[in-house]
Structures are given as structure tokens and as C-alpha cells.
Image (cartoon, grey):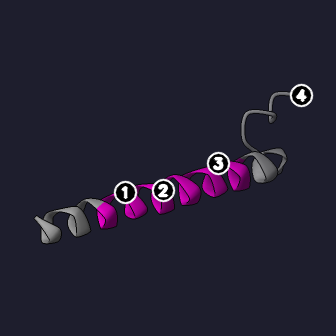
Amino acid sequence: MKENSTILQVLYIDDKVKWKHLKEYEMDKHEHRPLCGDTCYD
């Protein structure tokens, strides 16, 4: 049973890290958008 909880813990930490990276990636995308993302129409 101990092994099982360790695996769950690792998965949980992995998920948190993944979300952190996802958030940072989204922030980067928004910061670089003016370069020529959706605002190139004018």
C-alpha cells in the first residue's frame, strides 16, 4: 500500500508541475501576441 500512495503522490506533483508550465506558456503567448498574432489586421 505504501508504494501505491507514493505513485499517487508523484502523479499529483507531476500534475501540479504540468499546470504550472501550462500557465507560464499561456502567459508567454499573451506577452508575445503583439508581435503578430491576432492583432495584424490594422
User: Residue at coordinates 42% horizontally, 63% vertically from top-left?
Assistant: 13
Query: Pointers 3 and 2 in contact (CB under 8 A)?
Result: no
Q: Nearer the viewer, mark 4 or mark 1?
A: 1
Residue holding disc 3: 26
**Does label 3 or label 4 sit earlier along the sequence?**
3
Q: Amino acid at mark 1?
A: Tyr
User: Residue at coordinates 14% horizontally, 63% vertically from top-left?
Assistant: 4
Q: Is residue 36 magenta?
A: no
Provide the secondary structure element on which disc 4 rests.
Answer: loop
Q: Judge left or right: residue 27 versus residue 15.
A: right
Residue holding disc 1: 12
Q: Which mark is residue 16?
A: 2
User: Residue at coordinates 32% horizontally, 67% vertically from top-left?
Assistant: 10
Q: Nearer the viewer, mark 3 or mark 4?
A: 3
Q: Amino acid at mark 3?
A: Glu
What is the CA distance from the residue labelled 1 to the residue labelled 2?
6 Å
**Does label 1 or label 3 sit earlier along the sequence?**
1
